[in-house]
Image: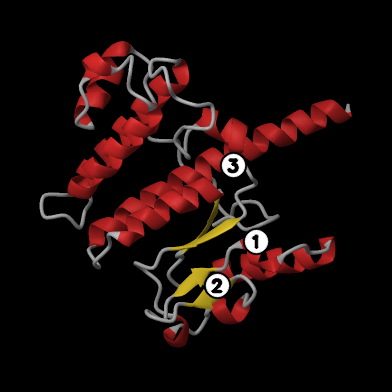
């Protein structure tokens, strides 16, 4: 996993084709239909319409739903990405510049924040009290045990206020150590928007294994696209310095 200020410990695999947003009108129409929207209304649909339809469709496709599965959830997610790509390209006329999929390259180009926000996959976390390598003990300013479940959760960065460079470096090191020592490898560092989406996935979790598979897919994708965006920014910085 990737922590603040440290390079990923492994090279993520190539991004799956299902997560590459298509731009053709046929693909956009198919994506809208999968989300339960009428493709004939594409010119008047807003990005909010697409998001609302996505959330409603995902409730049924989610691995924890009676008729849901990981495959269905990923297919709905891919349809959402294609539909939002159409919004960014102007097919959905009312889409605003701030809309878009948190894992898409075009969105990250505008909103990348360094992937400093922690996410703990509660589907795998043993719980702070039961874990010999608890992240709550290793990085107490970044992780806390949930009062209800006892499992670790991330403390939002804003809770710390302003910190000096030395404090930030020490915090980053503690976070990196916590993620590396986690026996279940359930800690990831992602963008704020990616974290918000993955927390939505957890909200519908009742312990089914399909949820964890979906989260692993999202983390894998986040590692790849965030690493690529960070690399692009480093390359641009070097060019400016030359």
Q: Earlier in the sequence, mark 1 or mark 2?
A: 1
- Up-down relation of residue 48 to residue 87 (above or below): below
Q: Image height check: is 192 above or below 129?
A: above
Dot 3 or dot 1: first in sequence order is 1
Residue 158, numbered label? 1
Q: CA distance from mark 3 to mark 1?
A: 23 Å
Circle number at residue 227:
3
The spot of residue 24 in percent (x, y) is 34, 13
Answer with left or right where residue 89 lies relative to residue 56.
right
Mark 1 → mark 2, Cα distance in angstroms = 25 Å
Q: Nearer the viewer, mark 3 or mark 1?
A: 1
Q: How many marks?
A: 3
Q: Which residue is mark 2?
A: 181
Tell me residue 193's x, y (percent): 51, 46
Q: Position of residue 145 (x, y in %)?
A: 48, 79
Badge 3 element = helix
Q: Nearer the viewer, mark 1 or mark 2?
A: 1
Q: Badge 3, how many Cα within 10 Å: few under 14, some, many 20+? A: some
Query: Which of the colour schemes (rainbow, by chain, secondary structure, one colour) is used?
Result: secondary structure
Nearest to N terminus: mark 3 or mark 2 = 2
Asked where in the image residue 35 lies, by quadrant, the reply is top left
Q: Is residue 180 above or below residue 32?
A: below
Would you call the spot at circle 2 few (<14 residues within 10 Å), some (14-19), or many (20 or more)?
Answer: some
Q: Residue at x 64, y 45 (%)?
A: 113
Viewport quadrant of the N terminus: bottom right
Give me the residue at 37% from left, 54% from top: 200
Residue at 29% x, 43% y: name it: 55
Spatial CA distance of label 3 from label 2 is: 21 Å
């Amino acid at each position: 996993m990737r922590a603040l200020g440290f390079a990923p410990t492994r090279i993520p695999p190539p991004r799956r084709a299902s997560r590459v947003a298509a731009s053709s009108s046929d693909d956009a129409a198919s994506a809208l239909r999968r989300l339960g929207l009428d493709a004939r209304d594409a010119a008047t649909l807003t990005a909010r319409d697409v998001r609302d339809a996505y959330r409603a469709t995902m409730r049924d496709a989610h691995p924890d739903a009676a008729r849901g599965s990981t495959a269905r959830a990923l297919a709905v997610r891919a349809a959402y990405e294609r539909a939002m790509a159409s919004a960014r390209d102007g097919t959905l006329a009312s889409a605003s510049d701030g809309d878009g999929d948190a894992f898409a390259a075009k969105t990250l180009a505008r909103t990348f924040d360094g992937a400093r926000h922690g996410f703990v996959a509660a589907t795998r976390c043993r719980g702070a009290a039961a874990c010999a390598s608890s992240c709550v003990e290793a990085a107490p300013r970044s992780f806390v045990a949930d009062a209800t479940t006892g499992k670790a959760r991330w403390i939002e960065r804003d809770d710390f206020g302003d910190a000096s460079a030395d404090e930030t470096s020490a915090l980053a090191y503690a976070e990196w150590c916590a993620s590396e020592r986690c026996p279940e490898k359930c800690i990831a560092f992602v963008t704020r928007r990616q974290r918000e989406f993955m927390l939505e996935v957890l909200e519908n979790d009742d312990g089914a294994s399909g949820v964890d598979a979906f989260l692993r897919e999202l983390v894998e994708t986040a590692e790849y696209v965030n690493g690529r965006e960070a690399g692009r920014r480093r390359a641009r910085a070097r060019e400016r310095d030359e």
